Image (cartoon, helix red, strand yellow):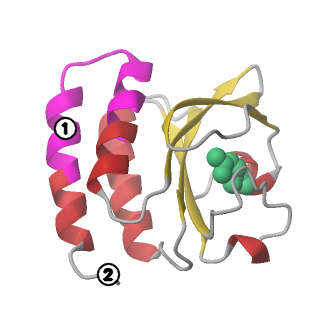
């Protein structure tokens, strides 16, 4: 694991909790999460959400280069995380069957399903890195806990 990763997550968590406390607007919270993580974590190249809208995933809010606007459930890493309801940690995107290459610079990726207080899937958090093997079990644990605090 990269040195300082846990400390960076802790600092981001403090900022995200401070920003989102008492906020009910889901988009405002997603925008704040994307802004804090993208600027606070090393190697995060694309950081944002695909929301569940009419049974498909629709982009935004996010920070980074342009991404594809809509993704079907079951397609790519985001669609797989959404249809399985499970976090996908992908150390090398070239080895993930059906990976959607929105930006050729992306080398590794993590996608975390986001649920509301009723347990309904409302979005996925998608984070891409230019560095291969950027994400591991620590990222999964930290991001899942952080997202549950903010959105559940
Ligand atoms: N890589 C994603 C597509 C979205 S972007 O990278 C912004 C996927 O395969 O789901």
Which residue is at a point 50% across and 36% down the rendered structure image?
62
**Residue under numbered circle 2:** 2
Is 20 magenta? The answer is yes
Res 18 → quadrant: top left
Q: Quadrant of the N terminus?
A: bottom left
Is 39 magenta? The answer is no
Mark 1 residue's CB less than 8 Å from ligand 1 = no
Question: Which residue is nearer to you in this view: 94 or 87?
Answer: 94
Measured as percent of width and height from the top left, residue 8 is found at 21, 63
Measured as percent of width and height from the top left, residue 116 is found at 46, 30
Could one spot residue 152 in this view of the protein?
no
Q: Residue furthest top?
A: 25
Measured as percent of width and height from the top left, residue 59 is found at 64, 31
Which residue is at a point 22% across and 50% down the rendered structure image?
12
**Residue under numbered circle 1:** 17
Q: Is residue 134 left or right of residue 56?
A: left
Magenta highlight range: 12-33
Q: Any mark on residue 110, and which? A: none
Mark 1 residue crowding within 10 angstroms, few (<14) / some (14–19) / many (20+): some
Which residue is at a point 20% across and 75% down the rendered structure image?
4
Camera-near label (1 vs 2) is 2
As drawn, 88 above or below 149: below
Q: The residue tagged with tag 1: helix, strand or loop?
A: helix
Q: Quadrant of the C terminus?
A: top left
As drawn, 145 above or below 133: above
Which residue is at a point 48% across and 74% down the rendered structure image?
134
Question: Which residue is nearer to you in this view: 43 or 77?
Answer: 43
Question: Which residue is nearer to you in this view: 78 or 65?
Answer: 65
């Amino acid at each position: 694991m990269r040195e300082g990763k846990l400390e960076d997550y802790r600092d981001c968590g403090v900022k995200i909790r401070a920003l989102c406390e008492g906020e009910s607007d889901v988009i405002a919270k997603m925008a704040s999460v994307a802004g804090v993580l993208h600027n606070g974590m090393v190697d995060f190249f694309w950081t944002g959400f695909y929301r569940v809208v009419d049974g498909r995933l629709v982009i935004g809010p996010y920070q980074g280069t342009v991404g594809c606007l809509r993704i079907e459930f079951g397609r790519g890493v985001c669609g797989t995380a959404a249809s399985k309801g499970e976090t996908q940690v992908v150390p090398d995107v070239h080895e993930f069957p059906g990976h959607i290459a929105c930006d050729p610079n992306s080398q590794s990726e993590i996608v975390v399903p986001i649920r509301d207080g009723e347990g309904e899937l409302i979005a996925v958090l998608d984070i891409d890195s230019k560095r291969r093997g950027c994400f591991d079990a620590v990222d999964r644990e930290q991001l899942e806990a952080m997202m549950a605090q903010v959105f559940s």
